[in-house]
Image (cartoon, grey):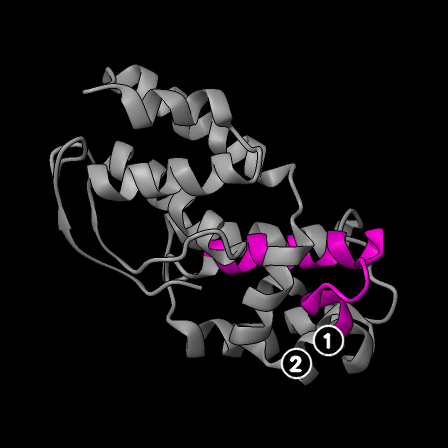
Amino acid sequence: MADVRIESIADPFSEDDPELGEAFLDVLLRADSMGLISEDVRGLDRKALRAVGKAVAEQGIGQAQAVETLTAAKLPRARLLDVLEQWKDALEESPIPSRELPALIDLFGLEELAALLDTSPSSLRRYASGQRSAPDVIAARAHFLSGVVGDLRGAYNEFGVRRWFVRERSALGGRSPKKILRKGWDPDSSDVREVRDLARSLVASPAT
């Protein structure tokens, strides 16, 4: 994952328009948590917008929207919001295990990620290196985790993200997220979706 620390805001974003900046940051952190962003980001600006557009388009995601951000001198605000929403939806529906697994290993470590994905460290190493294709179930779990991580990074640093998974949460009935992600877990099950919902709530309320 890249080092994303926002120190400045510039065109096409503005301190007077937090909605637009937050929408872009959401997409930026999602793409980065999927392992798609290769360079560190220090500002919400046109350079960062183009970096995201190029990164997602290289994976065959949101290519038409990327063309607009890479070639247009200035998109109208409403159109830019549409582009960001379309990118967000496209990223949500587009697992990329070849990029997500190495990024998640960098964050959690091989052993811990293998436990979270309910697979063996040796198999995970082969999936991440491309020696073997990740089974659909592992790809789906990795994509779910990268989504949770993307949401958490809007509120926590990397240490805080890792700690979030092991602390008991009242919103989860006193269970930790890791406890819910037990053997054979399904990203579409109701209790697992509660984990994602809790992480998403941090975007609106960092104190949750």
In this view, the residue farthest toward the bottom is: 111
Image mark count: 2
> In which image quadrant can residue 131 be found?
bottom right
Up the image or down, 77 lies above or below 51; here it is above
Q: Which residue is mark 2?
A: 110
In the image, which residues are magenta? 125-151
Which mark sits nearer the N-terminus, 2 or 1? Answer: 2
- Magenta-span inclusion, residue 95: no
Image quadrant holding the N terminus, namely bottom left
Q: Position of residue 59 (x, y in %)?
A: 56, 40
In this view, the residue farthest toward the right is: 184
Q: Nearer the viewer, residue 113 or 130?
A: 130
Q: Which residue is mark 1?
A: 125
Labels 2 & 1 near each other (Cβ < 8 A): yes
Numbered disc 1: secondary structure: helix
Q: Residue at x 40, y 20 (%)?
A: 82
> In which image quadrant can residue 191 be found?
bottom right
Magenta portion: prevailing SS class: helix
Q: Position of residue 190 (x, y in %)?
A: 77, 49
Q: Residue at x 50, y 57 (%)?
A: 33
Side (left or right) of 9 relative to 187: left
- Give the number of the disc on residue 206: none
